[in-house]
Image (tube, helix red, strand yellow):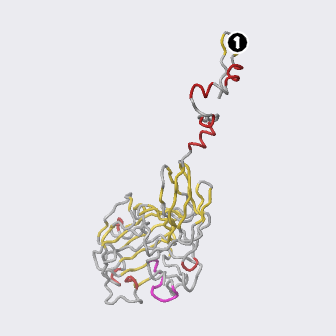
Amino acid sequence: MLKILRLTGISIGPLLIIGTAILPACLTNQTPAEQPIEVNTKAQFAVQTEQRFTLNGTVFHDYNGDGTKEEREPGIPEVSLNIGRRIVTTNSTGFYEISLPQGEYTLWIQYPPRGHNLQPFRYINISREEYKTIDKTILIKIDGDVIYDLALMQGFLTLPFGKDTVFTITQISSDYPLGIIHYVDRSNKEKVYMDWSGGGRTYDQHPGTDFVIKENTPILSAAPGTVLEWPFPYEVNGKNVVLIQHEAPYEKYMCITTDYGHLNEAKVKPGEKVKRGDIIGLSGKSGNWVYKQGEHLHSDLCYWQTLNPPKLYFTDPYRNTVALEWYSPGFWTRDNDPQYP
């Protein structure tokens, strides 16, 4: 860029113009093609210096709720991701890739995909500490190449005990998957009962799931959340029950909870944060009604409208995905039979 110099009020601009064809070559011994190019605007400078990075990853079906892609967990094709108002779609293996300049970007799934039994994926599993409903956004910081896998789940619950759990039924078979002797009673009629599949493995007005497991088995949190005070007069002081609040998938409810009853001992206290799979207590045979079947774990899934006073609705975590209501998804992850055949 030429600058006009002025001396004692006299412009020497014309002199510079006359000498432009001679002076540069004489003084620098460079050809005109070798002259440094000056950028005249900040916008041009930004374009020339902008550095871009790669964001990529795989959107996959998280079978076990650990948030990590495993070989047996398939990628999900044709998922539309909105990243900083740009759309990228996963390929046949669930892989996506996009080039972005440095900055912070929101990522969200534009059209929730469907999985087993054509049920929608409803949750994004961030880690053992956190999951989100699929309508929420994720903040991603780009200051280098980033690999970000998205773990999707149809349900958010994992089993409340480990793989080495001993069941007290003599022979575990397809009739007693995971040691379950009673499911939730899905019937709204008195003295009429029906389990999630239309069968009779429940009893009248039973609100939870009963697992017959050996006494003092470590009981695990089925999802991340916060431990709450037990708000009911039975099971005195909540000594034998642990109640955990999780993120509710529907705005009209205050929260969704799981509880774990008939424990010999609770290992957590109200106010504590727990991760998926944390030990929260030891199974037992305490509390009311347990004399009917001895040692076992009773677990409920509930939607709450208010905590004080308690106003809640019991929900079946094994909502049918097979026969009665094919459109009604369950709340378990893929690895929890019998929701997935």
Task: Please determine whether, in this image, residue 77 is positioned above or below residue 52.
Answer: below
Q: Residue at x 61, y 27 (%)?
A: 24
> Where is mark 1, residue-wise?
10
Q: Which residue appears farthest toward the top when viewing the image?
A: 8
Front residue (pair 146, 341):
146
Q: Residue 114 location, x and y as percent? A: 58, 73
199 lies left or right of 118: left
Q: Quadrant of residue 43?
A: top right
Question: What amino acid is found at the position of numbered circle 1 in the picture?
Answer: Ile
Callout 1: 10 Å neighbours few (<14), some, many (20+)?
few
Q: Residue at x 50, y 83 (%)?
A: 196
Task: Please determine whether, in this image, residue 67 is positioned above or below residue 341.
Answer: above
Location of the N terminus by quadrant is top right
- Magenta residues, as a range? 197-208
Instruction: Using the rendered image of the protein, determine whether residue 36 is visible from the camera's viewpoint.
Output: yes
Instruction: Using the rendered image of the protein, determine whether residue 228 is visible from the camera's viewpoint.
Output: no
Question: What element does badge 1 sit on?
Answer: strand
Q: Is residue 302 magenta?
A: no
- Count the marks: 1
Main SS class of the magenta portion in the image: loop
Q: Which residue appears farthest toward the left when viewing the image?
A: 216
Front residue (pair 305, 171):
171
Q: Residue 226 location, x and y as percent? A: 41, 60
Front residue (pair 138, 291):
138
Q: Residue 257 location, x and y as percent? A: 46, 67
308 lies left or right of 296: right
